[in-house]
Image (cartoon, rainbow, N blue to C red):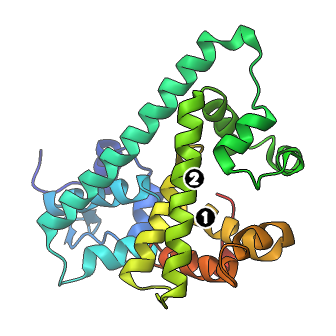
Amino acid sequence: MPQELTVGDVASLVGVSVRTLHHWDAVGLVRPRGRTPGGYRAYSAADVGRIHRVLVYQELGFALTAITALLDDPTVDETGQLQQQRRLLEERIARLQHMADAIDQVLASRTTGAVLTAQQQAEIFGQGWREDWAEEARERWGDSDEWTQFERNATVLSEDERKRLQADGDALYSEIAAAKRSGVAPGSDEANDLAEQHRDLIGQLFACTHSMQVCLGQRYVRDARFRSYFDEREPGLASWLSAVIDANALRYGVDPANARWE
């Protein structure tokens, strides 16, 4: 590979558009320091390496502002950062493999016309779950990719797997309620860990981004039925959990005030 590459060369090499590279240059995300004799941008091997790291973080759902902060932080150990990226990618690969396995199971049993019954819903979400909630959710999100993932994954779970998922949820929400009672502050390491456990729990049924998780937290507060579901465990739990989710999402470049289902 040449010592320095033009923007067109780099675009072809890494699979992004010239326009994207120009934008990343303008916002300071990847700013090539070199210039060709004709005055055009020239990328070094180090610049290309930075681009690859940006692409990994993008694949993991990080916003550009968050990626810039991570890559430019002088206190961050670059080797440790790369190791963290690898761990996050391995987690995503595992989730995608789980989804692929679920698709295989659905295809194998498609002729049965399996749907998620009320009993199965209760096994997953607990005895407080109401069947009309699922009907409302289907009407609201039935055309979304996430709902497709949810039904695909949920219907192929065995009875033991559904009960295990419900038990995991009960245990996590008990831990969350205990943290709230003990005064754990949103944004603290302990609270952020609980937020990630909550997102991982949802991720067993559909791919939940940090922005989607914020939207769920907002619904926990605004919808009286969900608020009651959480607040029966611990007074004020719905609002506290939403605040915990918001504070954790900020670490990943998500503005809770502008969060979208994406």
Q: Residue 203: x and y, percent?
A: 53, 49
Q: Which corner quadrant of the image does residue 43 belong to?
A: bottom left
Give the position of the N terminus as an image quadrant.
top left
Residue 157 visible from this viewpoint: no
Give the position of the C terminus as an image quadrant.
bottom right
Q: Residue 45: x and y, percent?
A: 14, 57
Q: Which residue is mark 1?
A: 213
Please give the name of the residue rendered at 59% of the width and 43% of the height, measured from the top-left corner.
Answer: 205
Please state if 113 lies on the left or on the right of 176 as rendered.
Answer: right
**Label 2: element kind:** helix
Viewer-closest of 203 and 36: 203
Q: Residue 109: x and y, percent?
A: 64, 12
Which amino acid, by three-letter code, is at mark 2? Ile
Which amino acid, by three-letter code, is at mark 1? Gln
Q: Residues within 10 Å of mark 2 (few under 14, many from 20)?
A: some
Q: Residue 107: x and y, percent?
A: 61, 14
Please state if 93 lies on the left or on the right of 217 as rendered.
Answer: left
Please give the name of the residue rendered at 57% of the width and 27% of the height, measured from the top-left corner.
Answer: 158
Please state if 109 lies on the left or on the right of 47 as rendered.
Answer: right
Looking at the image, do the residues carrying marks 1 and 2 touch, with CB atoms under 8 Å apart? yes
Q: Which corner quadrant of the image does residue 191 belong to?
A: bottom left
Task: Identify whether 48 is placed above or below 206.
Answer: below
Please state if 65 lies on the left or on the right of 239 as rendered.
Answer: left
Q: Which residue is mark 2?
A: 202
The label nearer to you, 1 versus 2, is 2
Please give the name of the residue rendered at 83% of the width and 50% of the height, measured from the top-left corner.
Answer: 130
